[in-house]
Amino acid sequence: MPIPTQATPDEQTTSNSLTSAGLRVLFIALLASTGLLYWLARRRALRPGGDDNSERKSDRSWCSLHPLQRRYLIVYVLAMLSDWLQGPYVYALYESYGFDRHQNAGLFVCGFASSMLLGTFIGSFADRCGRKRFCLLYCGLYVLSCLTKHVPSYPVLMLGRLLGGMATSLLFSVFDAWFICEASTTNQADLIPSTFGIAVALNSITAIVAGVLAQASVSIAAMQAWTPFFNVAGYCSPFDLSIISLLFTAVGIQTTWRENFGAASGTTEKSEGVGGGGTQLSWRSLQQWSRGLLQSLRSDRSIIPLGSVQALYEASMYIFVFMWTPALEQANGGAAVSLGLVFACFMTACTAGSQLFRYLSTPSITTRGPSPPLLSSGWCAWLRLYRRELYSCSRIPYGLYCYLSSRLRPRSVSTTPQWERSKPRLFRSPTEPRYTTCFGCRSTYSSSALSLPSWRWRRHSASHHCSWSSLWPSAFG
């Protein structure tokens, strides 16, 4: 196995001095615009007729939060931090091991495929076997996945992608389900909307911090071969930080959370259809789950078009996630790029997009003309130079988060607790085959692949609650 190649921090600084300076300017500008949009959105919400109550609830101080909220949010932030830290340098790590773009695509597809195969059913398994147990399983699987990143072996890295796909399926289904059940059983269901609002805000901050931490950890020292089959430092450093965050997450879950199960009544008792004391999923209960899911799809016609739009747009996002690193490297003449800082810019743009949506959204407003995703896609299709390509890449998450913020589940769509976590995953499953087809058929890069399709979308009402399953972390990881 050839020795991994990575430029030293001094070489990176020399070759990328102008690039790093431009990235810092862009990062500061994005932070300033996000702060301005937050101030404008808050000011509008506090006006007469604005969403004053929800605004005040989301701005509560940490000490005034319910103990259940604090227990959940601490663990949630640590879990998300461990996932975000892996986003900036995963492609660069594989590339430094000597794998070409086609092999990299195979690794990415493997992770998405494992998430697809497991994600549709993982919520049902966790409901029956215990959500706290599955949250701890998430930590264990992701630690193993991060450890495989130190080994420059394609089969080992493939195993790591399989484990990582399983872990992300748990992250975006079990943690929220645990809190919803816990809040319901303690008669604190009114805390759910405000808690998820706070979680989204903290998640945005966590993503930005993760990009900065990843950049700082990589800049400390170049990657070195500790043994012929194990590398340390360099591009492996963000994954080591992720392991530390996962260990703290596991400690928080074990010491502050109690076990709960997915009984239909919203209690912590084990649900029906579980044999052997609730540790095994019966075939009969699986059949009931499948029939109920199909029945809900047939009974509500609005689910299929809503889910189809979600699946198609998210498929394009997966393509962007794979292509952004080689796109910027190619536009920069093959020179190294400060990927951690670029990632932080992406996440800041996501936050700015959410604040823009928050500012523009009022009850019964229909967007007319080009949507934010359409505008962000158009910029990327036409701009070619490195700096312009970097700025256009930042516009993609800006428009994408406007889309994410508007991904609502109206009251006209069935939200039966038994099936609500499975339907989003059901429609996200076709995303991975499209990704596989795209990169299985092409081994060369074209920046036109970053042109995202866009859709006109309608916001039904400001009172509809969002589907809080995050999109970006599962794709980047």
Image (cartoon, grey):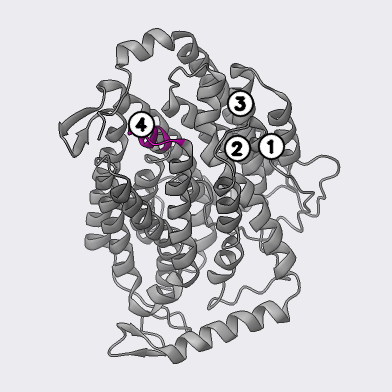
Magenta stretch?
91-100
Distance from disc 1 to disc 2, alpha carbons, whole Å, reads 12 Å
Q: Which residue is mark 1?
A: 451
First in sequence, mark 2 or 3: give its number: 3
Instruction: State which quadrant residue 43 falls in.
Output: top right
Instruction: State which quadrant residue 300 falls in.
Output: bottom right
Q: Which residue is mark 3?
A: 33
Amino acid tagged 4: Ala
The answer to whether residue 227 is above or below residue 304 is above
Amino acid tagged 3: Ser
Q: Are marks 2 and 3 in contact (CB under 8 Å)?
A: no
First in sequence, mark 3 or 4: give its number: 3
Amino acid tagged 1: Ser
Of circles 4 and 1, which is in front?
Answer: 1
For the point 74% across and 64% down, which residue is it? 305
Distance from disc 3 to disc 1, alpha carbons, whole Å, reads 24 Å
Badge 1: how crowded within 10 Å, few (<14), some, or many (20+)? many
Q: Are marks 4 and 2 in contact (CB under 8 Å)?
A: no
Q: Determine if residue 52 is in view.
A: no
Q: Is residue 465 magenta?
A: no
Q: Which residue is mark 4?
A: 214
Badge 3: how crowded within 10 Å, few (<14), some, or many (20+)? some
Distance from disc 3 to disc 4, alpha carbons, whole Å, reads 23 Å
